Image: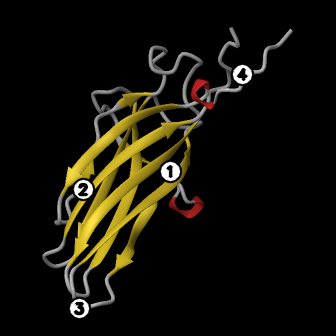
Amino acid sequence: MTTMVRNIGGLLSDTLSAVGNSSTETEVSSGYLDRTDRTLFPTGPALSCRVVINYEAVLIGSGTLTVAANLQDATSTDGTGVADFGDTNSGESFESAVVQTNAGTTDSTVTGIVEYDVDLSAARAAIRAQQTVAASGTGTVEWSTAIVFGPSRELPSGA
């Protein structure tokens, strides 16, 4: 007999990827996470994830907020063989795009979320997120990134 688990938390895992506070166009990389680690993922390697970037920016004058993000994979958490992962044509990264524009001449505080999904079935063991979040001119931005991992091929036990 199979027990149905009605708890999405049993299927999802999350980790804080990186936190930044910058108004310059500097790419920030998170630490590596071993998606095959049974302590973090007891039901097996994560096969998918959603990358979520939350931001709050002060845009000066007619300023803009630009976001770019992608994942990288490697053979181990020390970064051996690191390379960009995902297909930009299928939406598995967030290519540089203006996500907010201040149409007025006065300063404006804007908030929002940018997210994208990634199929991890072909990824190597270690993954990390990279992101660039930038406010034009003298604007400022505070942001954080989280990765929410989807299920493996095994379901959690219903006990």
Give the alpha-carbon distance from disc 2 to disc 4, as whole Å: 40 Å
Question: At 51% from the left edge and 55% from the top edge, which residue is drawn?
Answer: 116
Q: Quadrant of the C terminus?
A: top right
> Which residue lies under the disc numbered 2?
27
Label placed on residue 5: 4
Element carrying mark 1: loop
Image mark count:
4
Asked if labels 4 and 1 touch by Cβ distance under 8 angstroms, the answer is no
Give the alpha-carbon distance from disc 3 to disc 1, as whole Å: 39 Å
Asked if labels 3 and 2 touch by Cβ distance under 8 angstroms, the answer is no
Say which amino acid is labelled 4: Val
> Which residue lies under the disc numbered 1?
86
In terms of sequence position, does the residue under pointer 1 or pointer 4 come before the other?
A: 4
Label placed on residue 105: 3
Which residue is nearer to you in this view: 44 or 109? 109
Say which amino acid is labelled 1: Gly
Question: At 58% from the left edge and 35% from the top edge, which residue is drawn?
Answer: 150
In terms of sequence position, does the residue under pointer 3 or pointer 1 come before the other?
A: 1
Going by the image, does 157 lie left or right of 19? right
Pointer 1 local density, CA inside 10 Å: few below 14, some 14–19, many at least 20 = many
Q: Is residue 83 above or below residue 40?
A: below
Give the alpha-carbon distance from disc 2 to disc 1, as whole Å: 17 Å
Please state which of the two labelled residues, at mark 2 or mark 1, is closer to the viewer.
Answer: 2
